[in-house]
Image: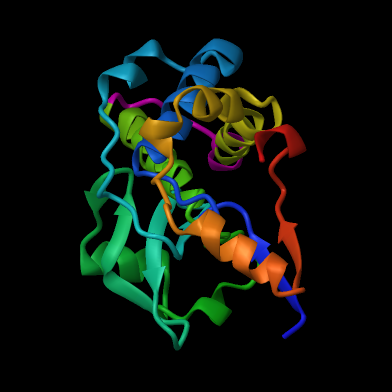
Amino acid sequence: LKVYGFDYDYTLAVYTRELNELIYNLALRRLISQFKYPAGLLDLPYDLTFAIRGLHFDVQSSCLLKVDAYSQIQTGAVYRGRRQLSDEEVKELFPGLYLPNMEGREMPQLIDLFSLPWAGLLSTVVHYCDTNKIVFDPKSLFNDLAECVKQVHITGEMYREVSENLKEYVHPNEGLKDYLELLHTSGKELFVVTNSPYPFL
């Protein structure tokens, strides 16, 4: 190999779980200040263990759900907010339990590690609305939350906080510098692929 490429986020820079909580909190505060969502949302703590990478979010029903390798919806892993739905509720919402049968439904997959705080935020806000009997438009809620999470990144808010507190948000990698120097002195070409802003690197 003559050329080595590296992703930056979660490869060269391996973040701690505290980063998820930071993104969640920054997005939640923006949701309250910019979109005027209830301040009571701040009373619900962020659950680091609630969501895993790879879940789908069904916008129409505001449910987080797990789908297996055969596109089958897993009945024991469907949540609206933080409430697990019964098998009967799942079958009523998703007849056939087969994802390709859901044509026309918006079901984004939360595939990367940056999706975990977004999944947490979706579950918190839906749970709060259901618990407090607040009626909401599912598409508008999804779009508002997506915009808040996006703004945390593109405004540089998250990057500034991480840069000022590296020990809290980035795992040390003592061998990385030596490894990259070894590749460089061996005549290898190196490049980084990232959507993070250049000053952050």
Q: Is residue 192 left or right of residue 37?
A: right
Q: Main secondary structure of the magenta part?
A: loop
Instruction: In this rendered view, identify the residue nearer to me: 194 or 31.
Output: 194
Q: Where are the magenta residues, as a range? A: 132-141
Q: Is residue 192 left or right of residue 10?
A: right
Q: Magenta stretch: residue 120 in it?
A: no
Instruction: In this rendered view, identify the residue nearer to me: 137 or 84.
Output: 84
Residue 86, x across and y down, in percent: 21, 62
Residue 128, x across and y down, in percent: 32, 29
Q: Is residue 91 visible?
A: yes
Residue 143, x across and y down, in percent: 63, 38
Instruction: In this rendered view, identify the residue nearer to me: 185 or 23.
Output: 185
Q: Residue at x 77, y 74 (%)?
A: 187
Q: Quadrant of residue 135?
A: top left
Q: Residue at x 34, y 43 (%)?
A: 17
Residue 127, x across and y down, in percent: 31, 36
Q: Is residue 157 left or right of residue 116?
A: right
Quadrant containing the C terminus in the rendered view: top right
Image height of 142 relative to 51, above or below:
above
Image height of 157 relative to 172, above or below:
above
Q: Residue at x 56, y 61 (%)?
A: 107
Q: Residue at x 29, y 33 (%)?
A: 46
Q: Magenta stretch: residue 139 in it?
A: yes
Image height of 101 relative to 178, above or below:
below
Q: Quadrant of residue 48?
A: top left
**Number of numbered discs on residues:** 0
Instruction: In this rendered view, identify the residue nearer to me: 181 or 59.
Output: 181
Quadrant containing the N terminus in the rendered view: bottom right
Q: Is residue 5 left or right of residue 36?
A: right
